[in-house]
Image: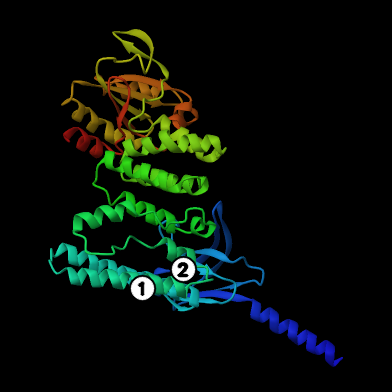
Amino acid sequence: MKNHLFLLCLFVSFTTFAQHHIQGQFSPAESFNFALLYHVTPTGTNYVEQAKTDTDGYWSIELQAGSKIGIYKIVYATPVEDNNFDVFYNGKESISLLFDIETGLHFTASEENKLWHTYTDSILKINSAIGRYYMSQKTDSSEITAIFKNLKSTQDFYEKASTNMMISPFVKSNKTYIPSAYEDVSTYSLNLKKHYFDYMDFSNPLLQSSDFLNERVTAYVFAMPEDANYYKMAVDDVVKATNDTDEAKIMVLENLWKIMIDKQQPDVANYISDTYLLPLAKTFNRTYLLETLEDYNKSAIGKKAMDFNFTYLENSKAIKTNLHRFNPTKSTLLIFWSSGCGHCLEELPKVKTLMAQHPEITVLAYALEDGVRNWNQTIEHFPSFIHTYDLKKWDSPLIKAYGISATPSYFVLDSDKVILAKPEHVEDLETYFNE
C-alpha cells in the first residue's frame, strides 16, 4: 500500500513539475482585455488558449505537459498582426513577463527569454554608440576601435552563454560585420551591407517560425535610399542570401510584397510578384498565395486593367465596345458606382467639378445596379461622363476582378489602360491630379 501511495505522489509531483505557465501583466491595465496564445511554426499559426486580464492587467495561461517547445506568439489587441510579440518556450521553465505600451516588453521569469532580451539590449546600445561616433565625424580611431572590440566580446559572450539553448541560432544569426581595424564610415557601411546576411541561417525552422527573419530582411531593404531601383536591388540581394531555403524565401518575399503595397511602392511590389513570388507559388503549389497574387495583379497599379465589354450611348446611338478599345488616345477615369449609393451621390458632383478642369481625361462611370429607372434619372446630372451599367450589381465578375469592396471606387488609367492610381476618395483623386 505504501509503495502505491509513493508512486501516486511521485506521479503527481512529476505532472505538477512538467506543467508550466505563461503569465504576465499588461500596463496600463485599462487598455487591455485579453491575451491570446498561439504556437507558431514555419507553415502556420496554431491557436492554443486565451485569458482575460483582470483589473490590474494580470493574466495567466497554463501549458499542458505535452505542450510543444518552440516559438509562441502573444496577441494583446487588434489588429492582431500589429499587436503581438514572440516568446521562447523551451519546455523546461515557466514564463513571466511585463508589457507596457510605453516601455515595451520585460521578462521577470524564464532564463531563455531574459538572456535573449539582455543580449538584444546590449547589442542595440553598442550599435547606437557606433552610429553616434560616425555621425559626430570624430577622428579618434582608438574610440571606434574600442567600441568594435566591445561588440565582438559581447557577441562572443552571448554566443557562448546561449550554447544548447533555443535562442542560440538567433544570437548567431543576429551577428553583424565587425571590422578588425579602423574603417571610415564609407568603408564600414559598404562592408556592413556586403556581409549583412553572412551569419543568418535561413534554413533554421525556429527562425522561420519567429518574426526575426522578416524583421532583419525588412531592415536591410529599407536601409536603402527611398527609390524603387534600390529596393529592387535589395530584393535581389535577399533572394541570393536565401539560396535554396525556399520556405524562408517565400516567407520573406511575401512579407516584403505586402509591405511594398502598404508603402505605395507598386513598381517594387510588382517586381517581387512577377520575378519571384508567382514562379515560387506555382512551383511549390501554394494555391492560396497564387490566388492572392493573381487577384492582386488584376487591379494592381502598374498593371493593365482587366478588359470587359460594355455599351454606352453616343448621340442617341448605342456603342458596343470593351475597355481596351475604348478611348485609345486619352487617359480614363474609371468609376464604379451605384445610383442607390448615398456616398456616391455625395462624391460624384465633386468629381464632376474636378474633372471639368481636366478635359484631357475621359470619365467612364460604370454603375452597379439592380434596375435602370433610378440610374436613368441620376445620370442626367452628369452629361460629361460616359455612362454604362451592370444589372448584376454586387454579383458582377468585375467586383472581384477589380477588388471592389465599396462604391465609389476610382481607377486612373493611361491611354493603354495601365492602372496609374487607385484613389480611395475624391479628395485623394484631387490630390493625385494636383501632383
Asked whether 115 or 367 is in front, the reply is 115
- Residue 40, percent from left and from top: 54, 59
Q: Nearer the viewer, residue 304 or 149?
A: 149
Question: Does residue 25 appear in the picture of this structure?
Answer: no
Please state which amino acid type lies under the numbered disc 1. Answer: Thr
- Left or right: 319 in relation to 10: left
Report which residue position mark 1 lands on.
154
Image quadrant in which you'd find residue 313: top left
- Judged from this view, the residue extending furthest toward the front is 181
**Sooner in the amino-acid sequence: mark 1 or mark 2:** 2
User: Marks 1 and 2, Cα distance to the nearest angstrom?
Assistant: 39 Å
Residue with the mark numbered 2: 33
Mark 1 against mark 2, which lies toward the viewer? 1
Residue 245 in view of the camera: yes
The colour style of the image is rainbow
The quadrant in which residue 258 appears is top left
Q: Nearer the viewer, residue 48 or 276?
A: 276
Q: Residue at x 23, y 47 (%)?
A: 225
Residue 311: x and y in percent read 39, 14
Which residue is at 54% across, 40% downward?
Answer: 288
Q: At numbered mark 2, what does the secondary structure look like: helix, strand or loop?
A: loop
Q: Is residue 372 above or below residue 57?
A: above
The spot of residue 186 in percent (x, y) is 20, 54
Q: Judging from the image, what secondary structure is the residue with disc 1 in?
A: helix
Label 2 amino acid? Asn
